Image (tube, helix red, strand yellow):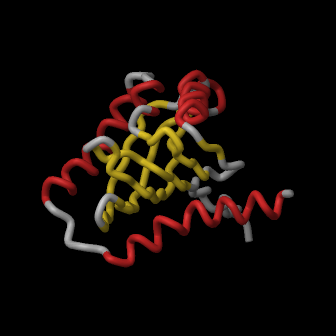
Amino acid sequence: MMHVARLALVAALLAPAAALAGETEVSAADRQAILDVAKQHDAALNRSDAAAAAALFTDDALVVPPGPAFAGREAIQQDLEKGIKSGYADHASTVDQIHVSGDLAWTTGGWSMTVPGPDGARRAVHGNYSTIDRRDGGAWKVRALTYNVIVPPPAQSASK
């Protein structure tokens, strides 16, 4: 059963990639609209508005985080609400690449935020992400989001 679920996940991620083979130059309007999605996502999270952040995803969007994948705008909103309640803040994204083919696009970039740390202090975390976006009702929305968390290397001991 798990094997079938993995195959379905791979197929869902690869199907848009086949369409991207006909990549075209990104128009200024599409570039700005896709950049705005990232800005709106950061702004919504930073004002603790999980519903507004989730609205930037398609109804059937897929998220592949460092843990188990989940799908659907409702599940995405619930995950974002959980993060907001646990104290995630100061979310910031950078978009490094944007590629477009028809009504599909893919982006790569980096993200950062702060999370509660020991003794009530905040600590910074960051990682990389990629999205597959789709034009949905005239607007760009995230169809698939994959992200990681970059773990800092272990501290070196002072004695050798």
Whole-percent x, y for residue 106 in the image: 38, 62
Whole-percent x, y for residue 66 in the image: 65, 52
Q: Quadrant of residue 75?
A: top right
Number of labels in the image equals: 0
Whole-percent x, y for residue 118 in the image: 65, 31
Q: Nearer the viewer, residue 111 or 134?
A: 134
Q: Quadrant of the C terminus?
A: bottom right
Farthest right residue in view: 1
In percent of the image, x 75 and y 57: which residue is there? Answer: 5
Q: Nearer the viewer, residue 65 or 154?
A: 65
In percent of the image, x 64 and y 26: which residue is there? Answer: 119
Whole-percent x, y for residue 18 in the image: 46, 74
Would residue 118 appear left or right of 42 to someone viewing this image? right
Q: Is residue 39 visible?
A: yes
Farthest front residue in view: 137
Would residue 27 appear left or right of 88 to someone viewing this image? left
Q: Is residue 118 above or below residue 102?
A: above
Farthest left residue in view: 28
Q: Is residue 113 above or below residue 48?
A: below
Q: Quadrant of the N terminus?
A: bottom right
In percent of the image, x 39 and y 38: which residue is there? Answer: 56
Q: Nearer the viewer, residue 73 or 112?
A: 73
Q: Is residue 116 visible?
A: no
Q: Quadrant of residue 8?
A: bottom right
